[in-house]
Image (tube, rainbow, N blue to C red):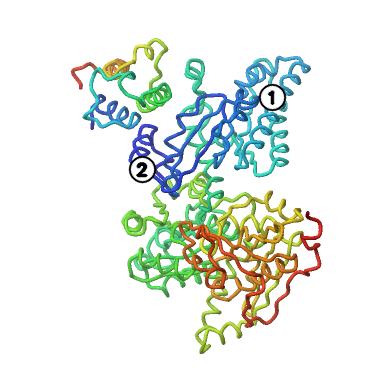
């Protein structure tokens, strides 16, 4: 069973069409041409659907790079970084 | 494809990324007042399944209506299909949220506003594109707070209006949004929070249904409806194994019982009655299988419902290829159903053109529902020829015996005593003509997929002739199986469409139809008859059609010209009835 972090990264990889290896903690919409607002929406929907969560507006505003997205999911699912 | 119905959105996104890209570009313009981009992975996967590379463009109805598109924007001009999804939430929020509390004049005003928007949008779209339009109906809004009485919602009135308008427009279809909603359920369909912040009104589950519903039409527009359902026997038509359990112990079910096998048989029979071919492909001793059909009174399906069968111990990929050859249909028009993953995955691997459905528990229990959602066999209208089709394949067995008894092909064709009839223009069955355009992929020179509206236009036009050919022989009636559309322009005639159903190959019927075109062209004073061959995925069979008939190639390599006098038809037909040449004036008469 893959960890939460792996599952999130798999989704990011599929939505943004990048290899898992190229995903870094600090990667953000500024770094990727196809990480536009449209794909950002798709990414959010996919994560919410997969983990059965609905993020608040404040959470979404904070989710502007890979580390923040992973952290938001972990926080909601009650996991700590020890589970990674 | 079954995965698409059950996968999570993340899985669908991953599958879309992995899916092979189709080889034919297909451009969809989505006209919408909300964010629709989450639909992309569904459309990508559905497109790849029929070899289409989907590209999506979004258009805002608010800017489409005035003139931004007219002003040199090519988006609509190059569209292969236009999908329209407007929401009452955006178009008239008060109508959506609190219709029950509005004074009726206000409500009427709002409804009028929506009608006007739709009318303007529709005419703007049609002005700029002749592509098919798929317009989703408005969602039913019935929320009330203080009354329990049932009243007709605004959406129903507006949808009725839309249906009429779209029917008048031609090649425009109203798709049932409520059906998509019913499949997902309200709470899985809407996302109030996202609607407020990023204008995504729907959840992925609803986008899935919208994509599936749209593709039922797109499959038709691109000639990709399925024609044949091939069924396994043990574990598919009945529970248990003939060889192991014995005929009497198979689980089928009495009429009226809720056995899933009965439901599958009933579904197959309904498909058969609407023109889908049925075939059997089973690893069994053949006599044992027919004994089940003969001896079990609870069998709904009969041997006579099957156009072909392969019941033996050979591998299924080989048997399926043989079935396709016998029925003369393309592999990709076949759906194969088997309860064994071993069999379906072997077929998927070795004959990837065939669509497989593994009858797992979910599929077994809701076979009809799943076929309905996937819409493989759906088409806009059924015709009387649909019922003839299955019988006609059955008759082919009888014809095979005649062929065996004849020394030459010529002798065989004469022995059939074929009676050919060609009707023209207002005498043709327009729905059947459109269906032939949609379904015919092999003997089809130009692959023009004309809809019923376009064909009605051709029939009405003075400078176009539409011919439909039907044939019956001493074995049976094949129905209307040939179509030609001829445009007359000054002293030339152009063959826009020329096609023959695969059931009618090898009889020389194409030459009768071509002769009809030649005669008509000559009668109207044409000095040249121009035919065109447009290569497609499956019409390689006819690439030499015009060349073989003394048409001279043009420089562009695709069109061929012939003096209308230089052609002789075959003479092995018992009778040929053609339309009177006097029906219309020669084209030269009125044109300057």
- The residue wearing badge 1 is B114
Above or below A67: residue B410: below
> Which quadrant of the rendered structure holds the C terminus of chain B?
bottom right
Above or below B107: residue B204: below
Above or below B420: residue B376: above
Left/right of residue A10 with respect to residue B502 in the rendered view:
left
Q: Nearer the viewer, residue B292 or B498?
A: B498
Circle 2: is it few (<14), some (14-19), or many (20+) Cα within 10 Å? some
Q: Earlier in the sequence, mark 2 or mark 1?
A: 2
Element at badge 2? loop
Give the spatial CA distance, label 2 vs label 1: 39 Å
At a point 36% along the width and 32% down the height, the residue shown is B10
Q: Nearer the viewer, residue B592 or B138?
A: B592
Q: Residue furthest top?
A: A58
Count of residue discs: 2
* Residue A44 rendering spot, x and y as whole percentages: 39, 22
At a point 64% along the width and 60% down the height, the residue shown is B494
Q: Are marks 2 and 1 on the same chain?
A: yes
Q: The residue marked by circle 2 belongs to what chain?
A: B
* Residue B144 rendering spot, x and y as whole percentages: 65, 19
Q: Residue furthest bottom?
A: B407
Using the rendered view, name the quadrant where residue B354 is placed.
bottom left
Q: The residue marked by circle 1 belongs to what chain?
A: B
Left/right of residue B32 with respect to residue A71 in the rendered view:
right
* Residue B15 rendering spot, x and y as whole percentages: 35, 39
At a point 34% along the width and 12% down the height, the residue shown is A62
Above or below B375: residue A60: above
- The residue wearing badge 2 is B19
């Amino acid at each position: 069973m893959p960890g939460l972090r792996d599952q999130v990264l798999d989704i990011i990889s599929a939505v943004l069409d990048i290899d898992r290896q190229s995903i870094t903690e600090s990667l953000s919409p500024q770094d990727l041409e196809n990480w536009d607002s449209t794909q950002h929406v798709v990414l959010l929907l996919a994560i919410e659907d997969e983990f059965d969560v609905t993020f608040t507006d404040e959470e979404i505003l904070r989710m502007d790079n890979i580390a923040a997205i992973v952290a938001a999911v972990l926080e909601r699912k009650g996991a700590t970084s020890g589970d990674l | 494809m079954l995965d698409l119905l059950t996968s999570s959105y993340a899985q669908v996104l991953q599958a879309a990324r992995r899916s092979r890209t189709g080889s034919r570009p297909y451009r969809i313009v989505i006209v919408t007042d909300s964010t629709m981009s989450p639909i992309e992975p569904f459309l990508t996967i559905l497109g790849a399944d029929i070899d289409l590379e989907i590209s999506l463009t979004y258009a805002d109805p608010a800017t489409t209506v005035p003139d931004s598109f007219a002003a040199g924007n090519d988006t609509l001009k190059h569209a292969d299909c236009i999908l329209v999804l407007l929401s009452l939430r955006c178009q008239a929020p008060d109508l959506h949220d609190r219709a029950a509390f509005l004074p009726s004049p206000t409500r009427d005003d709002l409804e009028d506003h929506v009608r006007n928007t739709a009318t303007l949008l529709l005419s703007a779209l049609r002005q700029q594109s002749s592509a098919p339009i798929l317009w989703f109906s408005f969602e039913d809004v019935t929320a009330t707070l203080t009354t329990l009485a049932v009243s007709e919602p605004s959406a129903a009135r507006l949808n009725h209006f839309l249906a009429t308008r779209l029917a008048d427009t031609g090649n425009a279809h109203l798709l049932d949004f409520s059906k998509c909603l019913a499949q997902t359920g309200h709470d899985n369909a809407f996302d109030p929070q996202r609607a407020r912040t990023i204008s995504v009104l729907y959840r992925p589950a609803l986008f899935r249904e919208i994509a599936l519903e749209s593709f039922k039409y797109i499959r038709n527009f691109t000639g990709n409806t399925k024609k044949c359902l091939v069924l396994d026997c043990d574990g598919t038509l009945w529970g248990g194994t003939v060889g192991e359990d014995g005929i009497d112990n198979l689980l089928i079910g009495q009429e009226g019982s809720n056995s899933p096998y009965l439901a599958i048989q009933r579904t197959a029979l309904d498909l058969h009655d609407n023109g889908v071919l049925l075939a059997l492909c089973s690893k069994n001793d053949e006599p044992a299988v027919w004994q089940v059909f003969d001896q079990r009174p609870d069998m709904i399906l009969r041997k006579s419902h099957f156009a072909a069968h392969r019941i033996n111990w050979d591998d299924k990929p080989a048997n399926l290829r043989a079935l396709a050859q016998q029925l003369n249909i393309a592999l990709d028009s076949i759906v194969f159903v088997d309860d064994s993953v071993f069999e379906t995955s072997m077929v998927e691997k070795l004959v990837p053109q065939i669509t497989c459905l593994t009858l797992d528990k979910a599929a077994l229990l809701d076979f009809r529902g799943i076929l309905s959602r996937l819409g493989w066999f759906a088409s806009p209208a059924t015709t009387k020829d649909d019922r003839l089709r299955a019988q006609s394949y059955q008759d082919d067995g009888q014809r095979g015996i005649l062929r065996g008894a004849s020394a030459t092909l010529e002798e065989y064709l004469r022995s059939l005593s074929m009676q050919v009839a060609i009707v023209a223009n207002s005498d043709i069955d327009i729905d059947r003509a459109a269906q032939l355009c949609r379904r015919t992929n092999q003997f089809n020179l130009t692959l023009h997929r004309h809809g019923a509206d376009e064909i009605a236009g051709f029939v009405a036009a003075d400078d176009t002739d539409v011919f439909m050919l039907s044939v019956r022989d001493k074995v049976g009636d094949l129905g209307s199986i040939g179509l030609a559309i001829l445009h007359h322009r000054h002293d030339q005639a152009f063959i826009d469409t020329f096609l023959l159903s695969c059931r009618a190959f090898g009889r020389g019927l194409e030459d009768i139809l071509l002769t009809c075109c030649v005669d008509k062209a000559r009668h109207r004073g044409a000095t040249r008859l121009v035919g065109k061959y447009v290569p497609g995925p499956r019409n390689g069979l006819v690439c030499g059609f015009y060349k073989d008939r003394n048409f001279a190639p043009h420089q562009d390599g695709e069109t061929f010209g012939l003096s209308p006098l230089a052609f002789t038809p075959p003479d092995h037909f018992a009778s040929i009835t053609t339309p009177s040449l006097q029906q219309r004036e020669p084209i030269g008469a009125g044109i300057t």
